[in-house]
Amino acid sequence: MFVLHLHQETLIPSLQTIMEKSEKLHYLENEYVELWVEDGVIYEVFKPGTVMNLEAGKKVVADRLKVSNRTVMPLFVDMRQLININQETRRFMASKDAVHYLSAGAFLVKGMLTRLVFNTFLIISTPRIPTKGFTDKEKALTWLKYVRNVN
């Protein structure tokens, strides 16, 4: 007779992981980001040490379109682990093709200085959708809900 012994410690994290993944709709992961839809918001979370070039940017946008099923939604981007994104890629990510099906974008950055630089860049570049940088995730998500309800 074969008896399988399971320790409670190993079961709890597995069940927790299953529960977390079940709340994320249309979950997709590539070498740069994790993407999913939750409460009508597309989440795009950069992986540690990510360096973005144009090829990576196109992959992220293509996968975001798959996750959103080409439905207009606000976007929450956690870019705290992003190391670098070149100018060509920034231009592409702000292009009409890249922001198609997005109603707004909230970007979570590392610190106040980064947020200041990010928001100053937004003033200069005039994004196609309402866009704002944050250092607090809850404030970013609250802003996205506000923008969604206003539009």
Image (cartoon, rainbow, N blue to C red):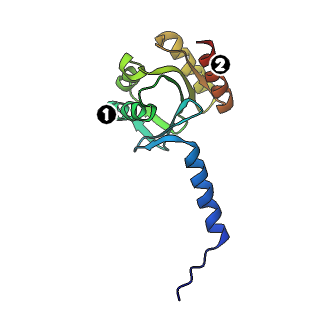
Horizontal and vertical percent position of residue 148:
59, 18
- Relative horizontal placement of residue 134, taking residue 63 as reference (left or right): right
| Residue positioned most to the front | 1
Residue located 31% across and 33% down the image:
55
Q: Is residue 109 above or below residue 123?
A: below
Classify 10 Å Cα crowding around label 1: few (below 14), some (14-19), many (20 and above).
few
Q: Is residue 125 above or below residue 65?
A: above
Horizontal and vertical percent position of residue 119:
57, 18
Q: Is residue 150 above or below residue 23?
A: above
Residue located 62% across and 12% down the image:
150
Residue located 53% across and 11% down the image:
123
Q: Nearer the viewer, residue 43 or 45?
A: 43
Which residue was labeled with disc 1? 55
Residue located 63% across and 28% down the image:
141
Q: Earlier in the sequence, mark 1 or mark 2?
A: 1
Q: Nearer the viewer, residue 140 or 37?
A: 37
**Which numbered mark, 1 or 2, is in the foreground of this view?**
2
Which residue was labeled with disc 2? 146
* Amino acid residing under circle 2: Tyr
* Amino acid residing under circle 1: Glu
**Rendered image quadrant of residue 149:** top right
Horizontal and vertical percent position of residue 24:
55, 42
Q: Are marks 1 and 2 in contact (CB under 8 Å)?
A: no
Q: Residues under labels 1 and 2: Cα distance?
A: 33 Å
Per the image, label 2 sits on a secondary structure element best described as helix
